[in-house]
Amino acid sequence: MVYAGAVVGELAGLPPFTARGLGLYQGRHIYVEDLLAFESGEYRKDAPQWQVLFSPFCLQNWAPVFDSHPDKRFSQYVWNGLCHGFRLGCHKVCRVKSTSHNHPSAASQQGVVSEYIQSEWRLGRLIGPLSREVVSQVHVSPIGLIPKPHQEGKWRLIVDLSYPRGSSVNAGISEELASISYMHMDDVVECIQTLGSSILMVKIDLESAYRKIPVHPSDHH
């Protein structure tokens, strides 16, 4: 979002194809309506009301960025999410069904799973241990492991929010809001051709990016 805020004045003059590839059109994010849709609808009111988990973002340092961002609805959405947690968009009309076992890949690597969970807990990204009474109020999704490519002995832990099929957390999220469209190299080339070879382009890969985004307490599963 810093990148978008820094060059949004120039991007506003890009052809629609390029701007949409960057997620912007006429200086505004084209996905704002979809993001705001996550905030609408009815959600569980009986969910355990825990505190928002720790987020590494220093909001005081980010405040000027949000204040100067031209798309106020987008910046307000992100600011509220960082302060109070983001909604998942899983409506309470969906009947979720908990599972009592993990996927075989996790069962066969219990040491890896245990080490990962302890690490996440120490970083403040997980809550627990929980009492039986509390556990009975939340939805339990299975976890699995997949090997990281080109990194022997390294694993990626997956919380399978799509299991069981039809009764999962993801089943309660509209498919229209769950699709992702990445920009193509053609968009990058067109951007360079339009703005000139002197532009600054940045690619950022955030480690454990999803683990740094706080979830709203009413959506804790």
Image (cartoon, rainbow, N blue to C red):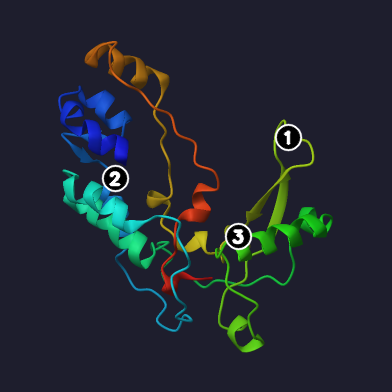
In front here: 199 or 139?
A: 199
Q: Is residue 13 left or right of residue 21?
A: left
Q: Nearer the viewer, mark 3 or mark 1?
A: 1
| Residue 103 image-quadrant placement | bottom right
- Disc on res. 83: none
Amino acid type, label 1:
Gln
**Which of label 2 and label 3 is nearer to you?**
2
Disc nearer the start of the sequence (1/2): 2
- Is 68 situated left or right of 41 in this image? left
Amino acid at the residue labelled 3: Arg
> Which picture quadrant has residue 92?
bottom left
Q: Inspect this view and state whether residue 7 appears.
A: yes
Q: Secondary structure at mark 1?
A: loop
Residue wearing tag 2: 31
Q: Which mark is residue 165?
A: 3
In terms of secondary structure, where does tag 3 sit? loop
Percent of width and height locating residue 149: 70, 34
Q: Amino acid at mark 2?
A: Tyr
Q: How many marks?
A: 3
Is residue 103 visible in the rendered image? The answer is no
Farthest bottom residue in view: 133
Residue located at (23% from left, 56% from top) = 76
Residue at label 1? Answer: 151
Rendered position, 60 above or below 6: below
